[in-house]
Amino acid sequence: MKNLSTSHSPGKIASLLLMLFSGVGFGIATAQQGTFWDDTNLVPFETGGSIGLSASGYSARGIENRRAPGVLQTHANFNFSAFGLRSGLNLNYSTDETGIRQNMNTLRYNASWKWLTMQVGDVNPQLSDYGLNGTTIRGGYIRAQPGNFLVELTGGRSRRLVRPSFESGFRKPSFEQWAFGGKVGYGRKTGSYIHLSSFYAQDNVASLDGDVIEIKPQENLTITPDFRVDLFEGRFSLESQVTVSAFTRDLNSSKFSSSDLDIPEFFTAIYQPRVSTRLNYAGQAMATFQSDPFDMRVGYERVQPGFASLGRGRFRNDQETLTLSPTVRFFRNRLSIQSDLLFGRDNLLGTRLQTQSNTNVATNVQMIVSESFNLTTSYNLLLNDVTTEPIEGQESPNAGQSQISHNLMFQPAFIIPGENYTHNISLSGGYLSVENKFDGDPQIQDMSYLSESYTGVLSYAITFPTGFTINSSGNYLTNQSNAGDIQNVGFNLGSSYALLNRKLTISLNVGLNRNKFERDLQTGSAMTSRLQQLTGSVNSSYRLTEKDSFNLTIRSRNSRVMGGAGNEFTELEGSFRYQHTF
């Protein structure tokens, strides 16, 4: 009996895909006349790109330079497309760590005709949320959707070979990996549908044969059915997808036969179970109800402990989440109230010493009082609890941790139009509290803390039809916590003006910020620190032609110690940039 690694080798499957892609490409090349060519998105030849030059200078007093005193940079990029084949060239030069950095973009072919799409090169198909979801595959992808039928195929190399090295900064080695996937279904994403997708990936064991390595070659097969059903003219919908993953952590581990596992014999020809193979699942379900004044969405997600898939990046497993999202609207949608309630926990099998559960309640209220005034308020509640199970044979008290966070925001906004100008006034006020408690062990109870913050921001802007604008803002923050008390007050004033038929734009901005920090010391005395920062910037941009532009920016920052400890410094930097596009 042959297993998948011998009867369905990556080379054979890649050859089959290549023949399939070549056949489609030949059909496009030989049908350049008539309606077929007219229905494609292929353009015979397109070019584009840009060249640019930038120079910057920097100086600092009171602190060490944060960047080089002077930097000159040039860049040039060229992109082209020929009948769907896209590529390009990027060239950069910088006097900062002087050297030429050149990169040749990956060749990628992308073409479509009515219901058929084809890609060759680096592709990122998404067949399911937990199976193949965004992993880059260097190979090909085909999607055909004639009517309500759907077929997707992809295959190629999903990971390149990286041999062991003792060079500094070297990451861990990697096997060459090949991956293949497919999806079939019926229906449309905007309505009812049913899909079945599968993804397979395998490390090439021979790619690192003979090298001394600690990593193990892996293999993965996933199967994902997903569906959506719309009822009552779309007012109610039910959708779900579940991915079953067979994951082998070591291809060199011992094999199981079909009789050992009491499974059909044909399964071992598709995927060979081994001692290191684990079967797990992850899935989600959602129900949605929509009406004129009221909407409701209920969702549930569960990812089993140990679930893994080579078709997506790392993500957290061993968790379940229940989500409730009601929305209600009044007065012809002038008043909208939306809430999101999330309840989650981990340690689903009860095999870990700690269990974390969390509750998150977020409510947002939007009110359009008139064309000139609107109000937005929001409230977020976050509850986190960590409980520790007792350890058999130990008399030490169980340690637990809880965190409670309240976040309240209030944001009115006014827009006052006039004949020659427009006023914009906005106010934002907020309250944030975070309380963290440790229970059980007296040695860590002293680590509990409480932090409370009050914030306020007032902004005003006026716009004139001549292209002249003035904007200003003031902010205030106060925070009290176990670490100390913080007070911050700031003010910003800016303006911009467009000249020469808006070809030249000049902007000016200045800001003043003062910070006070007080902290009680263990000696009984108090430590107080007062800092002041003054910032300023000038920015000008000019559009010479439709394809040529330059930009000039000058920024400064001055920090002074008004009392207590701190660093005084001054920074000044400027930059110039020119760019031509073609």
Image: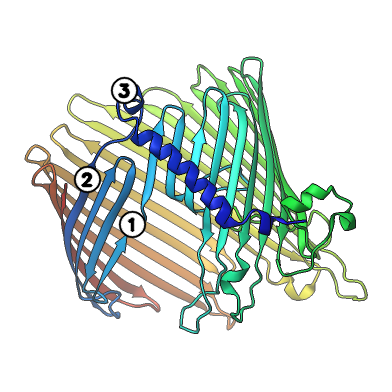
Left or right: where does residue 491 sit relative to residue 157?
left
Q: Which of 418 and 549 is in front in this view?
A: 549
Q: Residue at x 82, y 49 (%)?
A: 265
Number of numbered markers: 3
Between the residue at mark 3 and the residue at mark 2, the CA separation in whole angstroms equals 26 Å
Q: Where is residue 186 in the image (x, y as percent from the top left)?
A: 62, 27
Q: How crowded is mark 2: few (under 14 residues within 10 Å), some or many (20 or more)?
A: few
Please report whichever mark, 1 or 3, sits nearer to the chain's N-terminal start: 3
Q: How crowded is mark 3: few (under 14 residues within 10 Å), some or many (20 or more)?
A: few
Q: What element carries label 1?
A: loop
Determine the residue located farthest toward the right in the rendered image. Answer: 393
Q: Is mark 3 on a helix, strand or loop?
A: loop
Left or right: where does residue 88 sit relative to residue 14?
left
Please report whichever mark, 3 or 2, sits nearer to the chain's N-terminal start: 3
Q: Where is residue 168 in the image (x, y as percent from the top left)?
A: 46, 82
Q: In which quarter of the image is residue 36?
A: top left
Q: Nearer the viewer, residue 45 or 303?
A: 45
Q: Where is residue 526 in the image (x, y as percent from the top left)?
A: 51, 76
| Residue at mark 3 | 34
| Residue at mark 2 | 47
| Residue at mark 1 | 105
Q: What element carries label 2?
A: strand
